[in-house]
Amino acid sequence: MSSRIKRNNKMLKPHEIMKKYLIGICKGYSNSLVVCSPAGYGKTELTLSTLKELGLEENEHYKYISNYITPVELYLLLEEVNQLKEPRILVLDDVEDTLTNQRSIGLLKGALWASGGKRIVGWRSGSYRIKNKEIEFTGRIIFLLNQINKKSAIVRALIDRGLFFEMKLTLQDMFELMRQRAELPYLDIPYNKRKEIVQFLSKVGGSSQNITLRLLPKAFQLYKLSPNHYQHLVMELL
């Protein structure tokens, strides 16, 4: 499906679509959301900023985990999320390797797909760290992935049973997001200079394959390092 949806004559941008999905998860319209895009597209930043806008606090309303976690750690994490305040969100960022582990997949299936009206997660092997061998999971999970194997039946089931959004950004989208970010304070760089840096990036980066949102803070930092030579330094990154 296209990363742009037209509603009431207004075209929603990819970040706007993702934000609406995030709000939907927090309101309980789905038990899971899978967002997939290349690194540097702003998935993590948008997720955490949206949760903050909704008045949610880490370790009170949601937990954020990045990179691989073992099945035991995942089970214990699901228990911890159950103890949070509503909406009880678990954000799993960059966990592609976790989705290749059959035991972890089994835990996630139980956590997200109801059987008899309840989402039951069970642990059947011994571990001194696990006291409860079965729990009813009452939270929701957001997956932020850089890539996903859609051919995997297990992954396909994960996508089909929740919300899925594959974010695609054009260079125009990327530079528009940079312009929005440049409006926010960064270090002590004046706004006119931040705006100038974005204009420079949009001018020289139109044919580069290395344009992501991560380029902007790098350019700001290079400006601080060498205001008179930052353009040359940035060019070396492209």
Image (tube, grey):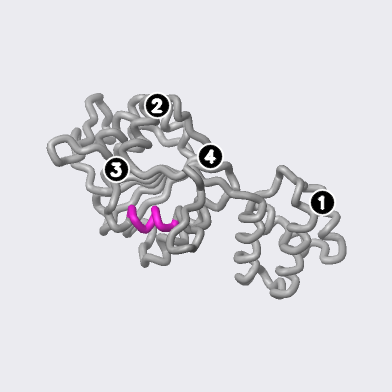
Circle 2: residue type: Asn
> Callout 4: helix, strand or loop?
loop
Instruction: Residue at 38% x, 30% y: name it.
Output: 156
Instruction: Residue at 20% x, 39% y: name it.
Output: 119
Circle 4: residue type: Asn
Foreground mark, 2 or 4?
A: 4
Could you tell me residue 109's position as x and y percent?
29, 33
Say which mark, if any, is on residue 146. Answer: 4
Q: Are marks 2 and 3 in contact (CB under 8 Å)?
A: no
Q: For marks 2 and 3, give the CA distance.
A: 16 Å
Say which mark, if any, is on residue 101. Answer: 2
Could you tell me residue 183's position as x and y percent?
62, 71
- Asked if one can make out residue 157 in the rendered structure from this viewpoint, the answer is yes
- Neighbours of disc 3 within 10 Å: few (<14), some (14-19), many (20+): many
Please give the range of residues in magenta.
19-25
Q: Residue 77 occupies which quadrant of the picture?
A: top left
Residue 86's place in the image compared with 131, above or below, is: below
Q: Residue 208 occupies which quadrant of the picture?
A: top right
> Callout 2: helix, strand or loop?
loop
- Neighbours of disc 1 within 10 Å: few (<14), some (14-19), many (20+): few
Q: Which residue is mark 3?
A: 78
Q: For marks 4 and 3, give the CA distance.
A: 23 Å
Could you tell me residue 27's position as x and y percent?
29, 58
Circle 3: residue type: Leu
From the viewer's perspective, is 43 left or right of 60? right
Instruction: Residue at 49% x, 42% y: name it.
Output: 36
Depth check, front residue: 231 or 35: 35
Which badge, 2 or 4, is on the more N-terminal residue?
A: 2
Q: For marks 2 and 4, give the CA distance.
A: 17 Å
Which badge, 3 or 1, is on the more N-terminal residue?
A: 3
